[in-house]
Image (cartoon, coloured by chain):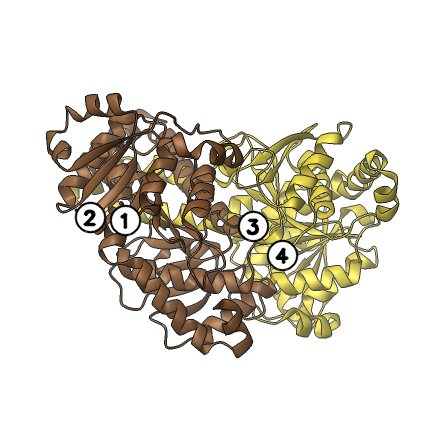
Chain colours: A brown, B yellow
Amino acid sequence: MTTGSWIAVDAMGGDEGLAVMLAGVAEARRRYDGTHFFLVGDEARIAEGLKKHPNLTANSEIVHAPDVIRGDEKPGAALRRAKTTSMGVAIDLVKQGRAAAAVSSGNTGALMAMAKLSLRTMKGIDRPALAGLMPSLGKHDTVVLDLGANTECDARNLEEFAIMGAAYARTMLDLKSPKVALLNIGTEDMKGTDEIREAAAALRAATHLPLTFEGFIEGDKLSRGDVDVIVCDGFSGNVALKTAEGTARFVADLLRIAFSSSVRSKIGFLISRPATALLRDRLDPNNHNGAVFLGLNGLVVKSHGGANETGVANAIAVAAKSVRDDLATKIAEDLQHFAQTMPAETAEAAA
Amino acid sequence: MTTGSWIAVDAMGGDEGLAVMLAGVAEARRRYDGTHFFLVGDEARIAEGLKKHPNLTANSEIVHAPDVIRGDEKPGAALRRAKTTSMGVAIDLVKQGRAAAAVSSGNTGALMAMAKLSLRTMKGIDRPALAGLMPSLGKHDTVVLDLGANTECDARNLEEFAIMGAAYARTMLDLKSPKVALLNIGTEDMKGTDEIREAAAALRAATHLPLTFEGFIEGDKLSRGDVDVIVCDGFSGNVALKTAEGTARFVADLLRIAFSSSVRSKIGFLISRPATALLRDRLDPNNHNGAVFLGLNGLVVKSHGGANETGVANAIAVAAKSVRDDLATKIAEDLQHFAQTMPAETAEAAA
């Protein structure tokens, strides 16, 4: 048993229940043949559920945890109960080095707090960030971070997010030198906060890193696919990602209302159904599922609470790819290169 | 000539040129019969353009201004040239009391800077805010502020934005007690920054104001129409509005690609064209055009740079309605009521 090929799955977290989680793991197991899974949660229920997935049974091990973190539980309360919960035990398997990554569809705040406390921040990183994937008009999704781990960020945080996000894009999107931009409210040099302008200056100077810094990007360009990584503080990132999700749903709702507004448009809808199905598929959050906590000593992936089987499998794919490509080492190397370009006192502070 | 019925229009600003501006004013003139217009800019060109709009000629007066603010001009440079530009002269007509409002499709940063310097902030207001309209699934648009006038805001700023936004919704949307929410990254009390939590506490306590405080709202709910006014700092507001615009365009692009992906879907598209036209109409930014600077001693409305004739008319409608309903007095009254509920030292500081 090698550490690299084991992923710990919180089988009890999420809104869709154990059966969907197990089906998702089974799908991921088919995609990533060498991967093994710790299925963490109620032993009897997991054993019962596994009967439907004989192929997964051979590649997994049940780890019992009697409790579950509730969706509305506050991070502080969750931390105190960590040791007996499926979420806490899954993270602990990463800490012990038995699993290379943990995946959970449970409470984001609790997962973030537990992962941070248990795994600690990587050397050279001030704050970890949550990085997600957003659909785009380009050939692949766009990486966006931070999505809410840090409501306020200084320039140094944003610079680290850029480096971690670029390393993540190299892994997930198979890019050599991802295009990175800072989210701002204009593209001119003088726009935005001091933090953003300072981070831009530092990233512009760091020309030897495996990333191409593209300056600022505005909210209306996020889905264009012009850049591969979008960097922002956790508040704006959360607002941007959720606004994009909400707007996509809003337009789909309007479309549904429009299509059912007359017999003629209903007929048109039936004929063009393959086209609208294509659209729905492209926008389905399950096809972009899996947000990864970057900057911790160990990999933790957050799957959407309402993810279906495919969504869960995609979140596990994020973990499997990151493990396979050794994302953590990439980040550590790039950070060291970045530190070397900075003025002496800043580099010391970061070491 | 009464002040209340005159609106100053920067006829030269915007990307679409003088002809579109004049056509927009002419359309607004048909909607608001009692309103008169100062058409500010190149006298000879405006006079020539007016030949197409005899009805407008009778209700307008040309005010000559030889220069135009460029779209990429920095606010500082624009301020130095204010006196000879169509934008600056339009604002000055408001300052002199000759016009009740100014409308411009020009450079936002320059307009903001000129309006602030020339008209000054209302008594009791710390910082003015830019309020816009966003399409929603509800019966009417949603007011969103600030859209970028203030990149960073404290609790007091957010509270003032809530009051000004509610007064604006009473005017523009004809509501008695608009539902107001603060944009946040979660709905629980402990979510977000200190500033947001503090503003929420103050607004919750101000129960006698003509608004209903609904707590926090997340990005994915902005278009639902559950609330009438969404309050946030200018950075998040700008990100949210632009992300919503960009995502709507992104989904429309995907739809177009999907509809042209096969002969079958092309036929479906042709049949359902009335339905998709309905959708396009609902999302057209021209139908939600006109962002107003709230909190100044005088009304200034920003029209989108690329607005068409209908868009310009809608921006003028924002000005006309705000003048007719005496928005400024509503804001001043509500501010005074709000100040009375605050602890003595805060109320003093605000006075």
Q: Are marks 4 and 2 in contact (CB under 8 Å)?
A: no
- Disc 4 is placed on an element classified as loop
Q: Disc 4 residue type?
A: Thr
Q: Which of labels 3 and 2 is toward the front?
A: 2
- Near-viewer residue (B182 or A153): A153
Tag shown at residue B151: 4
Label 3: how many Cα within 10 Å (few below 14, some 14–19, many 20+): many
Instruction: From the image, state whether disc 4 or disc 2 is nearer to you.
Output: 2
- Disc 1 is placed on an element classified as loop
| B11 left or right, relative to A338 | right
Where residue B215 appears, as percent x and y from the top left, is 62, 32
Q: Which mark is residue A5?
A: 2
Looking at the image, which is closer to me, A274 or B67? A274
Rendered location of residue A32, percent (x, y):
16, 46
Q: Nearer the viewer, residue A148 or B150?
A: A148
The residue that disc 1 covers is A100
